[in-house]
Amino acid sequence: AIFDRQPGRGLAFLVASGCLRDYPIDLVRFMQNHRVDLGQIGAFLGEDYSLSKILRMEFINAVGFRNFGVVSCLQKAFTNFRAPRDLQKVDRILSSLAEVWWQQHHMPFIIDLAAEEEALRLAADALTPPGSQALEDEAAGETP
């Protein structure tokens, strides 16, 4: 009712009346578990307000996209809300979707940076001609 007309005010009313806590996960669960107009959810999540961005990220992150490709991710996301007509709102939602998708898929590929730096140093040392290392050390102010 209230949320279907003005989602931000509807959430504020529910928090002020004690029906919901003001934690993003609680607000997102409310939007997911109650009969709320999917178009209004999309329009609200696409707004430029800080609360909309926080809830947009939480809402999208709660869906979970691990092991989903890009197209499947879009299909899954847009079953939970309808895309707004305003293209700026769509752009904000797509940017957040891309960010969450990347975070959820990037984790397995995190590289141990110390090991990578050591490998690069060893590769550089292997390519450095003998005797040139002493010249570089002197130029840097180090003595062998």
Image (cartoon, rainbow, N blue to C red):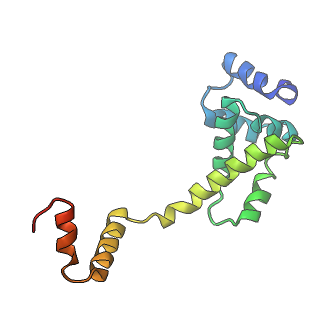
Question: Residue 10: x and y, percent?
Answer: 78, 24
User: What residue sits 82% from the left and 28% below the top?
Assistant: 3
Q: Residue furthest left?
A: 144
Instruction: Pick the residue in front: 51 or 90.
Output: 90
Query: What residue is drawn where x is 42% and y is 66%?
Result: 111
Quadrant in the rendering for residue 121: bottom left
Q: Is residue 120 above or below residue 23?
A: below
Residue 120 screen position, x and y as percent: 34, 72
Residue 143 at x, y = what percent? Answer: 10, 64
Q: Quadrant of the C terminus?
A: bottom left
Of 94 and 134, the residue lying toward us: 134
> Which one is in front, 142 or 39?
142
Which corner quadrant holds the N terminus? Answer: top right
Identify the residue at horizontal 68%, vertical 16% (top origin): 16
* Total numbered circles: 0
Q: Is residue 123 left or right of residue 110?
A: left
Q: Position of residue 104 (x, y in %)?
A: 58, 57
Residue at 72 percent across and 63 percent down: it is 70
> Foreground: 95 or 129?
129
Quarter of image, res 13 = top right
Figure check: 90 above or below 136: above
* Horizontal arrangement in the rendering, residue 106 relative to residue 62 (left or right): left
**Residue 86 in which image quadrant:** top right
Q: Is residue 83 left or right of residue 113?
A: right
